[in-house]
Image (cartoon, rainbow, N blue to C red):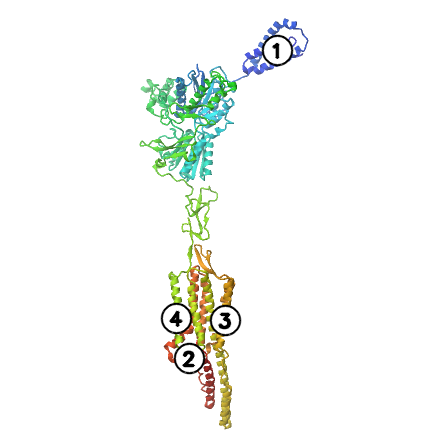
Amino acid sequence: MEGRPYCDEAPPFCTPHHSYLATFAALLPRGRMRHLSQGAAHFSVCCKERESTPNSVQHWQSMEMRGFLLGLFCFFCMNISIWAQSTCKLKAKFNLNSYKNVEKKRVVIGGMFPVHMRVASSGGNTSNLPVSSGCDGFNFRTFRWTQTMLFTINEINQREDLLPNTDLGYVIYDSCFTISKAVEGTLTYLTGQDEAVPNYRCGNGPPLAALVGTGGSDLSIATARILGLYHFPQVSYCSTCSALNNKFQFPTFLRTIPNDLHQSRAMAQLVLHFGWTWVGTIAADDDYGKYGIKDFKEQVEEAGVCISFSETLPKVSKPEVIQNIVQTVVESTAKIIVVFSSDVDLSPLIGELLRHNVTNRTWIASEAWVTSALISQSGVSSVLSGTLGFGVKRADIPGLRRHLLNLDPYADALTEEFWETLFNCTLDYSRALRMAKERAVGVNGTLSRAARGLPDGLCSGSESVAQLNNTYSDVSQLRITYSVYKAVYAVAHALHNLEHCEEGKGPFVGGSCANITNFEPWQLMYYVKNVRYKMPNTGEEIYFEDGDTEGFYDIINWQVNGNGEISYVTMGHYNGSAAPEEKMHIMKDSIIWNNGELEPPRSVCSENCQPGTRKGIRQGEPVCCFDCIPCADGEISNTTNARECILCTGDDWSNTAHDACVPKIIEFLAFGEPLGITLIVISALGALVTIAVGVVFLMHIGTPLVKANDALLSFLLLLSLVVTFLCSIVFLGEPQSWSCMTSQVALALGFALCLSCIMGKAAVLMLRARALKKARAKARAAAKAAKAAAEAAANSGSPDVIVTSSNNDIAASDEPEVDTLTFGHQRAMAAVATLIQAIACTVWLIILPPHPVKNTAAQNVKIILECDEGSVVFICCIFGYDILLALLAFIFAFIARKLEDHFSEAKCMTFGMLVFFIVWISFVPAYLSTRGKFMVAVQIFAILASSFGLLSCIFLPKCYILLAKPERNKEELMKPRPKPKDGSSTGTSASLATAATDVNASFASTAIDDQPGN
């Protein structure tokens, strides 16, 4: 049992019936429980060992008194030792500005307000003992919020219908708009004393109800995490960050100001309402700014709005960062700038914008600064006039202004600082005197008379706050102030419901109720979460849904009044709880924009693409930056900012503006248009002329010229020309099945008959020319033989014998020959050639006949009605056959062109065929280079030109003789002209040669006379 000196005689409080050690332990401070537990463990071991030894009851009773005294001695010795060894130290003493009134109060409500704008700089010196920093930059607006809470608690305490048996106290801290001060205030509030002891509630004062605060969202997030650990209710009046929705992280956070999700959606809807697609964003570097802008971006980007730039305002003002933001605003083409920031964080940027005179921008303000006097100071109208923003509900609070004006400057440190800052004086006489001496030292080093009397900088304490009419006393825009008012009332109504709970009908286990003088935070949290009440001055019903209230905002326009000052004019409202089409109501015609403009500004990276164009995305740039590309021909866009052009259907085409599909122009060579009329007149004229030629021939059918080379074949040729002239008319008009077949077949057969007749005529002329050539060759041979015989006879002296013999030989050798091709042969050739073409055309019409089609490929804007040949092979064969006939006719005529007579028909045919070939060779490139109805016109011109060429070349010379030179229409003139006689021939030989020639010529001429005229 070594090491256990007290175990030999165990004291009686080791027994279960005498727990003296537990009693002593209860007397010890909580911080020393660990040491006592060690001692208790030691005694427990001793007792267990002692109980294991057999002892009598009498022994224990006799030792009871001695054991008690020994235990008491041990206790005091241990307590002294533990007290000496204890090192519990207060690590820091917080320097907090506060309002406090807890004496004789049943319940205390906490509050936290950013009365100051920032924490005073500590210099960063770590070699000295750190102290809690003070605060700088007194904020009159937030001080009004603080006074509103005090006013509201006093108002509630005076009411008979709300907490009639309970006086509310308060503890209000200054968060200095920084997280560290907010945390300090929260810990101090929970501890219940000036020294914050985490996890402990020191003192036995009235219970803490809830915390109203703590200002910005960043501050509330920090404090809500701490308060949530203890299920301590927190009701915020201006923390709008959507992150606070998370009830897993912030289970006890509630607010009387709308959630920023509503505000972000309202801003997005406002941007979309005015058609702004190119906006810039500026956010404070805190959760309020980051979450607000994030939600806003998600809303607008989903709707196609692009963000030109996105800048972040530093929490601690840095001139270089502010200047960079200003430079970005100046360089951006975005005219709309959305700002999610508090007035404190935004103020340095506004000052820099004023210095750079950045105008022609429209600012969209969040509720944190839309009615802030810190921003809307004199001189900002050039930059901020026309600003649109969203403000929370505004209300009048009766009696508040009187409370604000009736302050006692000596009541507490915060009110004293407010007074000194407001009137630029001091309430401390010694300090005022010292400052006066410093200012009043004259040039000669003597004090002025003012310095010898009352100091100039000393406040009298009776200055009039109302006369200054500054932000603090301005109650025209009570928005956040009204939210503070509602938050305090929310806690008060929750306490009222808790106090008036009926036992057995309570919300807790067994229907129990909480005691208002000793309740747990989670019990009050139940009532706060489920509270439902109406505000006394407005009648507005307040309740929480998942800790949030309804998302209602006024839409405020910053307008410059007659005094050149900014005034807040309500232009509509937004209700996040309403139906989508009724959420926003805005009087846009009454809005005055920047620089006094009445028309909304345009803020787009690229102007809208009008119908007829499509958007072409620029590589590497936001989708709102694009080029407007005109739709191609045949494509349209009938909406603004179309992404793609729509292709028109086959029978439609885009109009000139490319914004609608219109029916294509139906094109064909009509009868009634000038070109059609011209072609009809020319065709009719050609047919009439041809008929007139036939009439002339019929009138002179008995004359040698008409009878020459078969008159019937000449009439067939004229008939074929009439057909070709008239078939060209069938090419005009809207193509029909019958017209397509008729025009092509009539043309093919007409030319086949025409060319076969010419071929027959030319074949006969070719054979006559060859026969005449042969006869003349024989005549020349006979003449030479006669000459030789005459010369021989002259030399022999018996010319009579020679001459007689020569004449007989010539007569025998120059007997005339008959034409090998008769008229019947010519007609058979024409009939067979035409019949072959007719058979080919019949097969064509049966198998693949021509038919009308709509040609939409030749010209985009037109539908060309034309005839489809049906088969390219057939039409090539058919017109190739005509070309073959034309070639044969030309060859025959060309060979017969040297037939020497007074009227050379072969030459006329040769010229006619040359014209025919020239026309159709020229037709091919002309036809291929034209489109639409002009292709038909070219084809008709080719038909007419070739027909006129054949008519003119073959029949015009004959008509000239028949009508103008009838004296040449004689049979002797139809004979070949004799060759000039050889001058070297003499005597009988020359006569014979001439005679032989004449005889042969006579035979040839007779053969010519026997053939019908052309």
Res 509 seen here: yes
Mark closer to the observer (2, 1): 2
Residue at the bottom extreme? 797
Location of mark 3 (residue): 833
Element class at badge 3: helix
Residue flagged by tag 2: what amino acid is it?
A: Pro
Q: Which residue: 40% across, 50% down? A: 657
Element class at badge 1: loop
Res 441 seen here: no
Compared to residue 795, the image places residue 842 above or below, namely: above
Dots 3, 2 in contact, CB < 8 A: no
Location of mark 2 (residue): 704
Element class at badge 2: helix
Dots 3, 4 in contact, CB < 8 A: no
Location of mark 1 (residue): 16
Location of mark 4 (residue): 689
Quarter in which the C terminus is drawn: bottom left
Mark closer to the observer (4, 1): 4
Q: Which residue: 57% across, 11% down? A: 24
Question: Callout 4: 10 Å neighbours few (<14), some, many (20+)?
Answer: some
Coordinates of residue 420 in the picture (x, y in percent): 37, 21
Q: Which sits earlier in the primary sequence, circle 4 or circle 2?
A: 4
Coordinates of residue 318 in the picture (x, y in percent): 44, 31
Quadrant housing residue 465:
top left
Coordinates of residue 17 in the picture (x, y in percent): 61, 9
Q: For the residues marked 3 and 2, what is the alpha-carbon distance in whole angstroms?
A: 28 Å
